[in-house]
Amino acid sequence: MKIVLSTLNAKFIHSSLALRYLRSYARPSFPQIELVEYTINDVTMNLVADLYKREPDVVAFSCYIWNIRETLDVVRNLKKVRPDLPIILGGPEVTYDADHWMKKHPEIDVIVIGEGEQTILELLQAYQKAKETGQPPALRDVNGIAYRDEEGIVRFSMPRAQIEDLDSIPSPYEDDLDELNNRVVYFEASRGCPFKCQYCLSSIEDGVRYFSLERVKADLLRLINHGVKTIKFVDRTFNINKKYALEIFQFLIDNHRGTVFQFEITADILRADVLDFLTENAPPGIFRFEIGVQSTNDETNRLVQRIQRFDRLSRTVTQIKESGKIDQHLDLIAGLPEEDYHSFRKTFNDVFALRPEELQLGFLKMLRGTGVRARAADHGYVYMDEAPYEILGNNVLSFADMQKIKRVEDVLEKYWNDHRMDYTLEWLLTHVFETPFDFFQSFGDYWENQGWSRIGHQLEDLFTRLLSFLEFSGVEGLEHILSLMKFDYLRNQKHRPRKLWWDDVLEKQEMQQVYGLVQQQAGRLRHDFAEHAATQKDYFKHTLSAKVSFDIEKWIKTGERIEGSYILVLYYPYKDEQGNAFVVVEQDMSVAH
């Protein structure tokens, strides 16, 4: 019997852990099981044609909020050309409201409810027996499914218990590792979450179950040795078991070989000794932590049954940041119960004060099966009928407020999270605007009013649009801000840029003068910079100069701002292993004019 397991990933670089579990569990009994991954951006009929060409006897899809619409489009059309083909759906999007999906979509034959490994194997065995005997499949004997009986009536079989011994699931990473080339790999060391946050599907499952450390280490080493670049742990709270987490951290420190690992951690319960261990021993750039803050409003957290000590979380995040070894991605959710616009502004500023490398501003989604969805009427929620079920407003946050916050999110993503102008933003947020939220809101409103949200942009547009906003806002010290913008633009380029977006470029005579000043200071240049500065031809090939209003080099080193006529000289080594360098020299105005 030929089986196709499929899903539509959000991006090509993503990979499906769920399908690989199903394949590893069923393949000993069904060697002709095939895993096929598409993306939500693929053309529906191309997917239908590809699946049709494979001539499966059974096809199963893994469903999530990001792919359910596109998956159902494929299923509807596939059923039209293969009405005899059993179509199975599983995954969190269909698990918690199976009756709704079965009744609304007659093209679905079976929905797997909850964990799928044992269920999919028994389903395939039922279909195999039906094919051999010519009788209908005995679906009622398969626990953990919704199905249609011979009259087409939706039925539910007995619930299926969780798999207690997770090691009984064959590793999804024993074979077929070439499928993962140039992809992000998702990895699971445990299942379940001890917390009951009411907006999260993990709150529905009781308890935490673990794979053995031996199994986890063996799988990780196999992936590392294969050359996987990024492994994202999907454990809901990786650090809940201190001893277990510490042993995995140590193993990865000893064996990483340049692979990057991302973990979801709960920062306010990260023990001090674990924190000290990480800040002392973690190799720079190898670990990345995703930390859900969501809200700093105590009443909001109480309503969603979220236990959080923000003071402890802040200390943890600060200590990790000061170590300079681990990037942190902090999450916020706009639209949680009883958090209005002004409260969310405070939440944003509370968290932004920690200066995470990335701040993800998301919007509450009323996921099927969650407590917030069940009690939506208590807080006047209005939300999208179809996935992703994002809220449109509630009793304290209007749709207009939501749109304002979306403009904050848009500018935050373009400017802060992409790290295109860190020095400029730090200056603006520290010296110019009352709070970080006010900057992102004001700029986001200006961006929308200019119509820029409807057109694309190139890198230099981000700088010219920020400059336009600052000029419009009438900020003080614009010449210093412009100097930092030039610095950020030049220092983040891999190659000497051919296109500049500012007007006060140096004349040829000024560039010659600057070359002489740089040569005089060769002793304080980085060795490769000094070598290329030795000859005029190499110097101009590897550098670009810009006028600045203060000595940025001294300001970065000491915090002292010395104003004057200075020239910033950026050096580009054109080597991947070597970053850019720079020097600031004072311009001789008598020669310049």
Image (cartoon, rainbow, N blue to C red):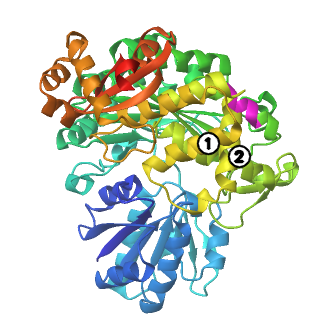
Quadrant location of the C terminus? top left
Range covered by the magenta-colored residues: 344-350
Q: Secondary structure at mark 2?
A: helix
Which x, y percent locates residue 466?
57, 42
Residue 521 lies in the magenta stretch: no
Q: Is residue 460 above or below residue 422?
A: below
Camera-nearest label, 1 or 2: 2
For image coordinates 49% across by 12% down, the residue present is 562
Q: Is residue 323 left or right of residue 309?
A: left
For image coordinates 46% across by 10% down, the residue present is 273
Q: Is residue 356 left or right of residue 546?
A: right
Mark 1 and mark 2: Cα distance apart in space:
9 Å
Residue picked out by circle 2: 405
Q: Main secondary structure of the magenta part?
A: helix
Q: Is residue 494 above or below residue 179?
A: above
Which x, y percent locates residue 58?
38, 77
For image coordinates 21% across by 31% down, the residue present is 257
Q: Residues within 10 Å of mark 2 (few under 14, many from 20)?
A: many
Q: Is residue 531 left or right of residue 49?
A: left
User: Which of the numbered marks, if any, corresponds to residue 361?
Assistant: 1
Q: Amino acid at mark 2?
A: Ile
- In this view, the residue in front, 92 or 156, is 92
Quadrant in the picture for residue 152: bottom right
Q: Are marks 1 and 2 in contact (CB under 8 Å)?
A: yes
Q: Is residue 48 above or below residue 197?
A: below
Sequence-first tag of 1 and 2: 1
- In this view, the residue in front, 374 or 464, is 464
Quadrant location of the N terminus? bottom left
Which x, y percent locates residue 185?
34, 47
